[in-house]
Image (cartoon, coloured by chain):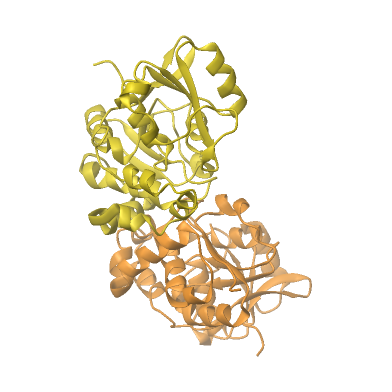
Chain colours: A orange, B yellow
Amino acid sequence: MKPILETCFSPSLLHLYDLNDRIVVIIDVFRATSTMAAVLHHGAHAILPVADVDECIRLGQEIPNSITAGERDGKVAPGLQYGNSPLEYPREFIEGKTMVLTTTNGTRLLHQCHSAEQIITGSFLNLGAVCDYLIQQQKNVLLACASWKDRYNLEDSLFAGAVYDQIGMHFRMNCDSTRAAAHLYRQAKSDLYGFIQDSSHFHRLSAYGLQYDMEYCCKVDQHNVLIQLQEENGQSVLKVPAV
Amino acid sequence: MKPILETCFSPSLLHLYDLNDRIVVIIDVFRATSTMAAVLHHGAHAILPVADVDECIRLGQEIPNSITAGERDGKVAPGLQYGNSPLEYPREFIEGKTMVLTTTNGTRLLHQCHSAEQIITGSFLNLGAVCDYLIQQQKNVLLACASWKDRYNLEDSLFAGAVYDQIGMHFRMNCDSTRAAAHLYRQAKSDLYGFIQDSSHFHRLSAYGLQYDMEYCCKVDQHNVLIQLQEENGQSVLKVPAV
């Protein structure tokens, strides 16, 4: 029998899903999981996702060859070195480094999903790698949208819809969140960036001049790496799994 | 300045919204709020929404000229007299009676929204009355979807989208749930019943042979009455307000 695929629109709805027999795909398109794709595609050693700014600063001091990065409410958090933009991390800068990262929504959701059998992260930048992996694994899947402070957002559900649009035939699905996401994606896919320009997050981030960031986050397969949560030296880190 | 309109996709997300300066529209298209529209349009005195089956039975015994009705998981709940179908209540039967009603999702959500400034109920059967009232009141609005056991569902968000499609220009809106609902509604509106046939609730209820019920719940303005939560003899009841 085919495995099950479902979509969760908000961390506040996570309790409705049993995570322990699932691959959970963490989705935070604007911008945590997009930044993760760029950073790891450009050869960073690992990303250490942490829940709060103080822990981020402390671990940044402890870990050799690391940088601290993150945002609160769309802006670089005070005390951190770098922001949450996929464009901030060219290979020349990030290769070999460990990034200690905290964000408003995405890193928090990662911690909420610790009971999942596996965790990977997804964004349009690595859509293909996510889809290939889910087909190959043949396990139940939860597409978990980070949303904005627990409120439904368009861009994360559009990504869930894109995944279902590409690989739905490999899964059983009876989940209205997935259906709605797929309907929206099919409406949007010919001009994803155009569609997303009427969304809460676009309005919020464009007030900080971040339009180009968001346009970049809508590019499909630009940084097509699989990103998986793994244990390393007693820490949970995001890495590109060794082949 | 125009009032605000927002949409809440699940009772589990209600804590994100401030209810006390709002008109909350309770939406449970399949089938509580559709049944309410039929029952009150056909001249019932009032509907007393109660949270559990035991209370429903007790109040049914206390209140003169009343009937008990309700469902759990789509079927008539054991111990109650009638079900949760808008087709069960012709005028000859229900006129002048009080209905004591409990349902899986809709009546529970009503109780969760007790702090709202006003509560009305909405379904396609009384879409026009809901829209006219919201325009006339010029107050902030929350479209509150009952969903299915806290999981997002298509039919309730389609109704939210229909409301926004009709009266959005009278409100300020920066809410992705409302945007998604409106996108979906515009995709579905030429054949609402056809669109809804691929949804969790349709699959669930059609297994009980309730297709005709759901087709009926997709008819627009068939029972076009305004339904409001009011206090009567110390009880919260749903009634058609006196003009």
Q: Farthest residue toward the right?
A: A234
- The image position of residue B201, as x and y in percent, is 46, 51
**Which quarter of the rendered picture does the C terminus of chain B lie within?**
top left
* Placement of B200 over or under B112, stated as above or below: below
Q: Quadrant of residue A11?
A: bottom right
Residue A73 visible: yes
| Image side of residue B158 versus residue A101, left or right | left
Residue A103 visible: no
- The image position of residue A100, as x and y in percent, is 63, 69
Residue drawn at (56%, 14%) of the image: B61
Residue drawn at (34%, 31%) of the image: B37
Q: Quadrant of residue A238?
A: bottom right
Q: Quadrant of residue A229?
A: bottom right
**Which quarter of the rendered picture does the N terminus of chain B lie within?**
top left
* Placement of A36 over or under B208, stated as above or below: below
* Placement of B203 over or under B119, stated as above or below: below
- Nearer to me, A37 or B226: B226
Number of numbered discs visible in the structure rendering: 0
| Image side of residue B226 versus residue B15, left or right | left
* Placement of B53 over or under A238, stated as above or below: above
- The image position of residue B31, as x and y in percent, is 42, 40
- Nearer to me, B8 or A235: B8
- The image position of residue A190, as x and y in percent, is 29, 74
| Image side of residue B25 versus residue A44, left or right | left
Residue drawn at (50%, 46%) of the image: B148
